[in-house]
Image (spheres, rainbow, N blue to C red):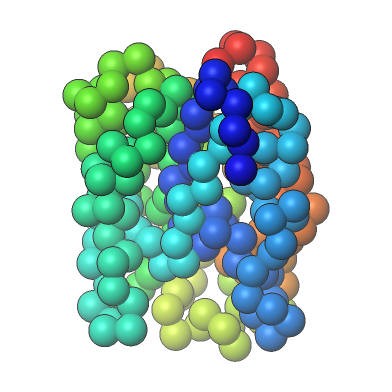
Amino acid sequence: MNTNPQAKVILCFGDSNTWGQNEDKGFGERYPVNVRWTGRLQQLLGTDYYVIEEGLGGRTVDLDDPRPEKPGRNGFDYFLPCFISHSRVDLAVIMLGTNDLKAQFSKSVLDIANSLNKYIETIRSLSPKTLILLVSPVPLNTNASKFKEYYGELYNEESGGNSIELAKEIQKVAKDKEVLFLEAGVVAKVGLDGLHLDPQSHSFLAEAVNEIIKRDEY
């Protein structure tokens, strides 16, 4: 843990790709902290920054997962106490939307992106000086070798197509609300399961976020 009392606080709020889910769960659940993009980001930024990893597998933007074995997946319900508990937050990085693409939710790409407005409004009402970075998730790869085996019952072909369109809609939200934006799919890719980042992509994503932070000296 970073113990520099003057460190700028960066809250990374996301789903399993922020938690660090392995691209092939048959070989382990979670990447080590020095492989996960949040851990890599901390290494790149150094002790002048404190990176807080708030990832949860299955987390949605604002939907409840009806499966009893998946409680607490509504990201917006948890975000308020999470944000307050980590105050002060200098930069909030939000990367959500993949789980909202599941067939069971039937949620449009436009609705998923617009749901992120609530996060922006909440942050600005609590801490107007906090900077916000919206990161659009890496698109699904429904043709990946283990996708159908692991996630074929949760996502369909429409989910795959929508995942490609999601970045454009999230970028519109970011532009409209005048917050920072990063399209993760430009720098990173999913691995064998078609859903989770491969190890190298965690590094690439960390480098991209680091560049944004250092560029503007947050």
Badge count: 0
Residue drawn at x 61%, y 12% is 217
Residue at point 68%, 38% (across, down): 41
Pick the quarter of the image with the C terminus: top right
Question: Image check: 89 left or right of 36?
Answer: left
Quadrant (top left/top right/bottom left/bottom right) for the N terminus: top right
Q: Which x, y percent locates residue 196? A: 62, 64
Q: Is residue 137 above or below residue 194?
A: above
Could you tell me if residue 129 is visible in this image?
yes
Residue 145 vertical position relative to residue 13 in the rendered view, above or below? below
Image height check: is 104 above or below 55? below
Residue 71 vs residue 99, the one in the foreground? 71
Is residue 140 in view? no
Most extreme residue toward the top is 216
Where is residue 186? Give x, y as percent. Answer: 67, 40
Indicate the quadrant where residue 66 lies.
bottom left
* Between 198 and 176, the one nearer to me in the picture: 198
Asked if residue 176 lies left or right of residue 121, the reply is right
Question: Is residue 170 rendered to the left or right of residue 62?
Answer: right
Q: Residue furthest right?
A: 200
Residue drawn at x 75%, y 32% is 44
State the image coordinates of residue 32 (x, y, percent, origin top left).
71, 62
